[in-house]
Amino acid sequence: MKKNDPDNLKRPPAEPFRPGCKVWLEKGETNFGDGLYYLLLNVHDYGSIAQAAKRMGMSYRAAWGKIKRAEKSWGVLLVETQVGGDLGGGATLTPEGNKLVKCFGEFREKVERVCQETFDECFGNGP
């Protein structure tokens, strides 16, 4: 098959293109993107930094460091922890942490929707 064969260019690709986009927020020296978003979401869901880290395949130390760097850079507390004891330890998101996760989740969904709509407008049923 010739490299610049016009007949080759008329065939549809084996797998159609689909759009992709990444979004993050910038503030200070730390960005808020998917990594920290999913970490905080997992802290919320599992009530534990250790469980959130395990779920994401990262060490507790890495997860704790990521949270602490963001808190220090942004000057806001995102996670409150409770030391173990009879009731066990745990972690919860602060009101600020909850708001950040909620708003970023909505922001991501809207950007992904606009990305898909723009892709459909530009490419239609094309490549």
Image: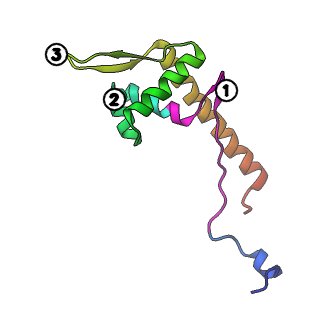
Q: Amino acid at mark 2?
A: Tyr
Image spot of residue 24 (x, y percent): 63, 32
What residue did someone put label 3 on? 86
Q: Quadrant of residue 28?
A: top right
Q: Quadrant of residue 63?
A: top left
Q: Earlier in the sequence, mark 3 or mark 2?
A: 2
Marking on residue 46: 2
The answer to whether residue 126 is seen in the rendering is yes
Mark pair 2, 1: CA separation: 27 Å
Image spot of residue 121 (x, y percent): 76, 49
Mark pair 1, 3: CA separation: 40 Å
Dots 1, 3 in contact, CB < 8 A: no
Image spot of residue 86 (x, y percent): 16, 15
The answer to whether residue 100 is seen in the rendering is no
Dots 3, 2 in contact, CB < 8 A: no
Please report the bounds of the magenta region as a residue range: 15-37
Q: Which type of secondary structure does the marked residue at label 2 adopt?
A: helix
Q: Quadrant of the N terminus?
A: bottom right
